[in-house]
Image (spheres, rainbow, N blue to C red):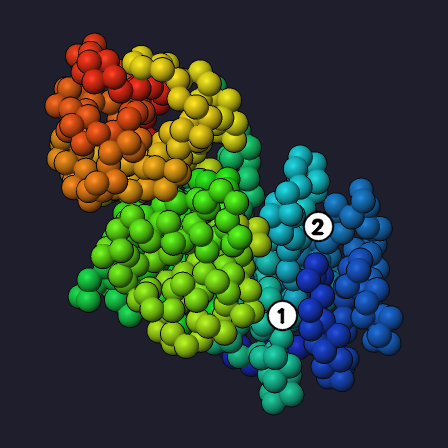
Amino acid sequence: MAGPRHDPADYRPRDIVPIRRALVSVSDKTGLLELGQALAAAGVEIVSTGGSATLLRDAGYEVTDVSAVTGFPESLDGRVKTLHPNVHAGLLADLRLASHESQLDELGIRPFELVVVNLYPFVETVASGAEGDDVVEQIDIGGPAMVRASAKNHANVAIVVSPESYPAIIDALGTQGGTSLVQRRELAARAFSHTAAYDTAVSTWFAEGTLGDDIDLPAHLTIQAERLSTLRYGENSHQRAAIYSRVGGHGIAQATQLQGKEMSYNNYVDADAALRAAFDMVKPAVAIIKHANPCGIAVAAPNALDPIASAHLRAHECDPVSAFGGVIAANRTVTLKMAENLRDIFTEVIIAPDFEPEALEVFKLKKNLRVLQLPTDWQQERMDVRLVSGGLLLQDADRFPDDIESVAKNWELVSGERPADADMESLIFAWKSCRAVKSNAIVLAQGSATVGIGMGQVNRVDSCRLAVERAGDRARGSIAASDAFFPFADGPQVLIDAGISAIIQPGGSVRDAEVIDAARAAGVTMFFTGERHFFH
């Protein structure tokens, strides 16, 4: 229910509000002593809590404990400190109204003109891998209450939620003794965004914690993101675009650009696709992406002296023509040798967990090359979100089990003999690789490196033909992976005629028997996985 309405004539104008009393309660102590010095020099009374009060007092500044204001000790391990009328009346009193001023006088409560609050490190705690009660204890209650109260009352109170705003407050104190209405309104907008992002992080953590095979997806979904930068244009030059960082995100949006031109919309899309392909692999691996599709994926050759450089060369050999102007992801530190191999290959972006200093020196010679380093806490997403007109789709991310080698032992062998271990490794590699290819997807691989890829066709036969055409003579003896079942035997026959030695596919077609008969007639090994990997 809305509060009482007042006649506009009741409000007394307030632009510059002198700062006489400040409430300070921060978990991030960055810049606090500099702010405390400015407040003390201006004669501002500082009311503070817990560690903030201790830090300021140890620095020699006079501090009033919040318990002296409330008349109640901080209790319940700090869960209750500021939740008290003596605090919130001082935050919410609208001193443009004479009636509010007189009520404060009657209650013996003094107002605050400045509130400096940042919230418990909930997001950082989740990112550290903490679970359960350790996370729950970082859900701030009193902090958001103070932030929202102060932001609502921005006509009278300046609310600061980030050390980034301290210099502006210090300047306002020095030049005009207080804050302007425009400044307080801007601070209020930031404050509401701050609490919204915080609440979203909390609700997301609870929702993800309940996502399981037997539990419904969340009935309400909130996605909070902050704009990092405006891009030159979108997928095409007439489209506007920007990159946003999602609260709690640990992916391509959080990568650090070490050199090169500004990232484009398409660069981000391709870099994300490259991560999807390279980081499915356990061994040192490289994926080369063009227009969101792989033109080469490979793991290092056995006993390679420089595994990641070996993986790149093997991936590049799959389709050197398409690799021109591609985006590369490596799942290991990029070495000097790999950088030297890239010296004469035009590449748009390279992304990896880390780079040898000597590799970065080589890349400096390619000034237009964008070099991105993944955040140390990078992780694959647990959920996929896709916008559709009027709404969005949410699904579990398509992931392979960590023990896929054990899972592979239970794949159904429907034709031929079970291959030797080395060929089983290639089968697993091909199966993982086809997940990164746009459907309909066919991957041909030898020795855990792609040799031909057919993608994005509206029928599986054309994808088979495309993969075989790109592989050429390398198709003979290769292993073929299909992201979904073959509806007819014509697709497998294209592969068989090219000389492939084994096929891995989900199975499940009403014509499986026809497909199996074709493989058996050709003496080709065929596995059914029972699981498909569409990627649209």
Residue type, label 1: Pro
**Residue 286 in sight from this viewpoint:** yes
Quick one: SS at disc 2? loop
* In the image, residue 69 above or below residue 503: below
| Horizontal arrangement in the rendering, residue 9 relative to residue 27 (left or right) | left
Residue 149 position in % (x across, y down): 58, 57
Label count reads 2
Residue beneath the point at 44% across and 52% down: 310
* In the image, residue 260 above or below residue 235: below
Q: Which is more foreground, mark 1 or mark 2?
A: 1
Question: Which disc, if any, is residue 404?
Answer: none
Mark 1–mark 2 Cα distance, whole angstroms, equals 23 Å
**Residue 95 in sight from this viewpoint:** no
Please tell me how crowded label 2 is: few (under 14), some (14-19), or many (20+) other residues with Cα within 10 Å: some
| Horizontal arrangement in the rendering, residue 378 relative to residue 125 (left or right) | left
Residue beneath the point at 38% across and 76% down: 367
Residue type, label 2: Leu
**Among numbered discs 1 and 2, the one appearing first in the sequence:** 2
Quick one: SS at disc 1? helix
Residue that numbered label 2 is attached to: 83
The one of 99 and 167 positioned closer to us in this rendering: 167
Residue 290 position in % (x across, y down): 27, 54
Residue that numbered label 1 is attached to: 163
Q: Quadrant of residue 79?
A: top right
Residue 388 position in % (x across, y down): 25, 42
